[in-house]
Image (cartoon, helix red, strand yellow):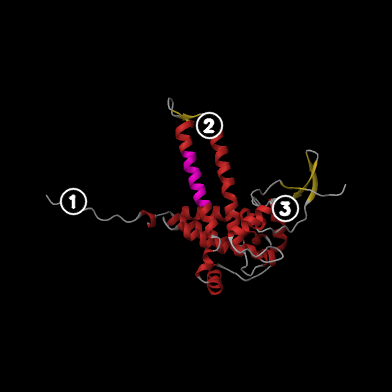
Amino acid sequence: MEPSEHPAEPDPAATPVKVDAAVLLLVAGVTAAKHPLVYVRLLIQVGHEPLPPTVGTMFGRRVLYLPGFFSYARHIVSVDGKRGLFRGVSPCVLSSLVSTVVRGKTKQVRLRTGLMSVRLMAQFVGREVKYSGIFSCVIRIFKEEGLSGFYVGLLPHLLGEVLLLWCRNLLAHFINSYAVDENVSVVGPKSVKNVAKIEIGVGLLMYPFMLVADVMAVNNCGLAAGLPPRSPVFRSWLHCWNHLSQKGHLFRGSSLFFRQVPVTSMQD
């Protein structure tokens, strides 16, 4: 008998997947629908606070209430109209569609389109028109910064992804080892609550890395959001991390509602 020969299977990490057009429309629609949240969060992350805070009290202590998502969104609409809420949505939709259709190397695509989206959105701060679309971003970044410009903020982003993967593997081990009842093969309510708390904690651990990646994406790129006096020019992502840490801003933008800043020195 002749030895059976098996044809080499294509690498599943880069195999196109047949996706129905309705699925693609749904993915694009969901991405576009949530974009205003992404947009407002990004502006908060880069430190843009166009609306004055209001003074209130909490547990007898005076605090500054910063505008939440809805107030911020209304401000954007008042400046740019309703369409302004979708500034920078094209790279996000493109990334989502590519991730849906193609398996493999989607992380690289997402990172590059993410950089473009961040810069398109950050133009709101200084009212620039330096970047006007995906192709404009590609040409401008390559012309001014070379290939390395597409990888600005990559390292903290990758570190955050690795941390997330490690923590989730640890969480899976915890569920398999402690949370699952071997007799009935179900997870108890208390275990579910514990797992949910751990998942929230994992997200909080990852957030500063994502924040630093977004801040570095606009740092010293010619936009007002990444230049003095709005932002220092950072030598590296570690310099950015240390600066945000000293200011107590490593979780800036992690919450879009009930944003409070303690008032440390106010006259009675």
Please report contact status of discs 3 and 2: CB closer than 8 Å, yes or no.
Answer: no
Tell me the SS state at disc 1: loop
Tell me the SS state at disc 2: helix
Q: Which residue is mark 1?
A: 4
- Left or right of 89? Residue 165 is left
* Amino acid at pointer 2: Ser
| Of pointers 3 and 1, the one earlier in the residue sequence | 1
Q: Nearer the viewer, residue 170 or 72?
A: 170
Q: Which residue is mark 2?
A: 191
Q: Residues within 10 Å of mark 3 (few under 14, many from 20)?
A: few
Residue at left 76%, top 48%?
65
Q: Which residue is mark 3?
A: 71
Q: Nearer the viewer, residue 32 or 63?
A: 63
78 in magenta: no
- Left or right of 104? Residue 68 is right
Q: Which secondary structure is most common in the magenta stretch?
A: helix
Q: For the image shown, how many numbered marks are present on the structure?
A: 3
| Of pointers 2 and 1, the one earlier in the residue sequence | 1
* Amino acid at pointer 1: Ser
Q: Nearer the viewer's eye, disc 2 or disc 1?
A: 2
Residue at left 75%, top 56%?
51
In three-dimensional space, the C-alpha distance between marks 3 and 2, rounded to whole angstroms, equals 38 Å
Residue at left 55%, top 29%?
190
Q: Nearer the viewer's eye, disc 3 or disc 2?
A: 2
Q: Residues within 10 Å of mark 2 (few under 14, many from 20)?
A: some
Please report contact status of discs 2 and 1: CB closer than 8 Å, yes or no.
Answer: no
Segment colored magenta: 160-172
**Residue 96: horizontal and vertical position, in percent?**
50, 56
